[in-house]
Image (cartoon, coloured by chain):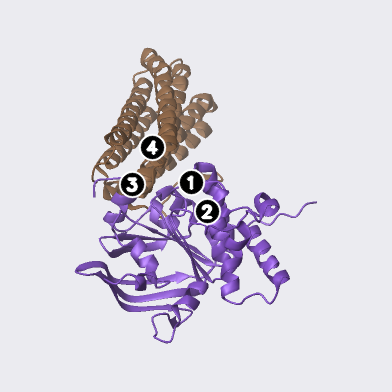
Chain colours: A purple, B brown
Amino acid sequence: MEDFTYVDRAMSTQQDIKISARGVQVYYGDNHAIKDVDVEIDDKTVTAFIGPSGCGKSTFLRCINRMNDTIDAARMEGTILIDGEDIYDPKVDSVQLRAKVGMVFQKPNPFPKSIYDNVAYGPKIHGMARNKADLDEIVEKSLRKAALWNEAKDRLNAPGTGLSGGQQQRLCIARAIATAPEVLLMDEPCSALDPIATAQVEELIDELRQSFSVVIVTHSMQQAARVSQKTAFFHLGNLVEYDDTDKIFTNPQDPRTESYISGRIG
Amino acid sequence: MNEHISSAYDRDLESITTLIMRMGGLVEEAILKAAKSLADRDIELAEEVRAGDKAIDALEEQINEEAARTIALRAPVSKDLRSVLTVLRLAASLERIGDYAKNIAKRTSVLVGMSPVNGSDAALRRMAREVEQMLKDTLDAYIRNDAVLAEDVRQRDQEVDQMYNALFREFLTFMMEDPRNITACMHLHFMAKNIERMGDLTTNMAEQVIYLVTGEMPDEARPKDDKTAFVSDAG
């Protein structure tokens, strides 16, 4: 007789808190882009940020790996802790931080290098491999995790830019996870992909949840519903509602959330 | 509730609601006519109820198709999702209530050849009126998004249960008094049971309306008073 293991996704057990944001404010010059956001993001969970364009969801995502540091006009207040450690502490090296908090962008942006070098780049600069064999192993493991190994193993020296859009995005995911991050930020990772490639990336996101805390910004309500366990709805820089995804999509508490997810005039 | 950005979506949902209300109207009518046909020994009216069930069944099918189409094309969420789930369940309950009315009409056709059993026709008619009123209020609660009215209906099922209990004992007594009453009383008992079941289904519908409005099924146990399952003899 076969043994069946039935895992109920809805019955996700209580997870540890990975990221904890308190009183986060972001200003771009005079524009108050994020208004006093408090949020706790669970480990080994996919958290979706949804909301209309300009609501601050991407801005908030970029606070989590200090990407906003690179924008001169941007100013941030409040604290963000990862594993209880303040990532805006002056002692924190933002390059090290970004190795721990990987990011995947809307448009696949592989380096103009070979598939192998795209993935090997991060581990190399962070000194994660002692020799070529180590590096080979990291590259293979990352490509396997990103579900690209079978398609790429015979052409590791071919340029990454020669892959299809969906493959390029999986390559970028492989590159992001090669440095063994703990948090993976994804800013609309499927908006440039066709439905098949989207389904592959979504399947991958669900697998990545075993090892990482994944935070995804998406404009597709259906995608948020499909891939995430928690959903945060942003509107005009405020975090309006944050709850279990099934709760948000069956019985949201705030009328603004209700209007947005059901496509109503808010 | 605000309008959808897509006005066709609003029109789709409204048209399903209209179908439910039409179906509900037909079912209310079927209940009243079935009870009247028994009281008046009116075979033609009973026949009308039996024939009318086809229209009710057809509406259920149409509602199922429209709901499936809406799910496939609109991927409804939140209140929209609850309203599509609700119409499916309301339509299924209405269809069952229609079947019970049809069954009463069938038995009426048999009963016309027998002498009436002391006062039971009037009692059944009162019970049917009570259930029809509950159904009417449930449909009003549905169209007005009124959870308070739906909760009121839910509480009223107890009265129907009590009427059924009383009739059950009455029929039992008549049958023991005179075995010639048995055939008629068996039919009348099934009719009473049918109406009692209609009350249960209407209560389910009222609970569905509460879910539609609040997002949560009422979990607090509602009062139930059908105790006939525990009756061992006429005493």
- Are the residues tagged 3 and 2 within 8 Å (C-beta)? no
Callouts 3 and 4 in the same chain:
no
Callouts 4 and 1 in the same chain:
no
Is label 3 or label 4 in front?
A: 3
- Are the residues tagged 2 and 1 within 8 Å (C-beta)? yes
- Kindly give the residue lying farthest to the top in the view shown: B44
Chain bearing mark 3: A
Distance from the alpha carbon under mark 3 to that under mark 4: 18 Å
Q: Which mark is residue A262?
A: 3
Q: Is residue A202 above or below residue B163?
A: below
Q: Residue at x 43, y 71 (%)?
A: A65
> Mark 2 packing: few (<14 Cα in 10 Å), some, or many (20+)?
many
Q: Measuring from the top left, give residue B135's x and y in whole percent.
A: 33, 36
Q: Measuring from the top left, give residue B61's x and y in whole percent.
A: 44, 26
Q: Which residue is mark 2?
A: A169
Q: Is residue A2 above or below residue B109?
A: below
Which amino acid type corresponds to the residue marked 3 in the rendered image?
A: Ser
Foreground: A146 or B40? A146
Q: Which residue is mark 4?
A: B87
Chain bearing mark 4: B
Q: Could you say whether the residue bearing mark 1 is in a helix, strand or loop?
A: loop
How many numbered circles does the render carry? 4
Of the numbered discs 3 and 2, the one sitting upstream in the chain is 2
Chain bearing mark 2: A
Is label 4 or label 1 in front?
A: 1
Callouts 1 and 3 in the same chain:
yes
